Amino acid sequence: MNDAVRKTLIVILDDANDNRPIYDDAPFNKDVFENTAVDTVLFQVTARDADYGLASLVSYKIVDSSSAFAFITVIDVPDLAPRFLNLPYSAIVNEHTAVGQTVFQVQAIDPDTGVNDKIHFSIQNINDNKPGFYNCHPECNFEEEARHFTGSINEQSSRGVAVGDLNIMARDLDEVS
């Protein structure tokens, strides 16, 4: 007895989760300044999955057995002032020294690292006023600059002897407060 039973079955196939997600904008490289605030979002990850239905849903988590790769480069910012060595610097420069001639050298170190470790400095001319000369006999009068001075000295006097009755005061206007 061979009674054959025929039945029509409807089979619904779900898509197997057989495709790996493809990450957009991978690899993840980011330059970050060293003073970036804590909890700043550096980048966002998005991915697409070629599967359909529930198999195409992408969720993200990093667990002990998995890994994620992101290359973060921390960029130094020039937040530390250079430090000059062997201070103070002092030099005597002849007034006829040629322009551009080295008259002294300084040394400085910059605690910042990377491309920001170049130190640029300049010497500013703070002596932009010529000194004023004042006759101080019997007392100094700083209201009016003297143009001529007279005094007396014996012509047989030795070199370096003070000139009698002559009292001159030089005042640097850049240093007057």
Image (cartoon, rainbow, N blue to C red):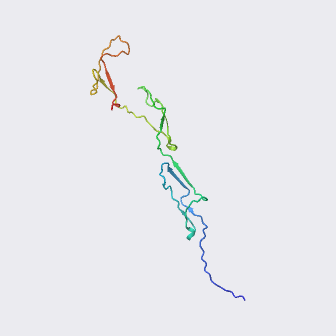
Residue 47 position within the rendered picture, expressed as x and y whole percent measured from the top left: 54, 62
Residue 159 position within the rendered picture, expressed as x and y whole percent measured from the top left: 38, 14
Residue pictured at 51% horizontal, 51% vertical: 31
Residue extending farthest front: 64
Position of the N terminus, as image quadrant, is bottom right
Left or right relative to 142: residue 38? right
Q: Is residue 157 above or below residue 96?
A: above
Q: Is residue 48 above or below residue 97?
A: below
Q: In the rendered image, which quarter is residue 149 located in?
A: top left
Q: In this orientation, which residue lies closer to the viewer: 95 or 175?
A: 175
Residue extending farthest right: 1
Residue pictured at 52% horizontal, 49% vertical: 74
Q: Is residue 26 above or below residue 101?
A: below
Residue pictured at 50% horizontal, 51% vertical: 32
Residue pictured at 56% horizontal, 70% vertical: 54
Numbered-mark total: 0
Residue 139 position within the rendered picture, expressed as x and y whole percent measured from the top left: 28, 22
Residue 75 position within the rendered picture, expressed as x and y whole percent measured from the top left: 51, 48
Q: In this orientation, which residue lies closer to the viewer: 142 or 47?
A: 142
Q: Is residue 69 above or below residue 58?
A: above
Position of the C terminus, as image quadrant, is top left
Residue extending farthest top: 156
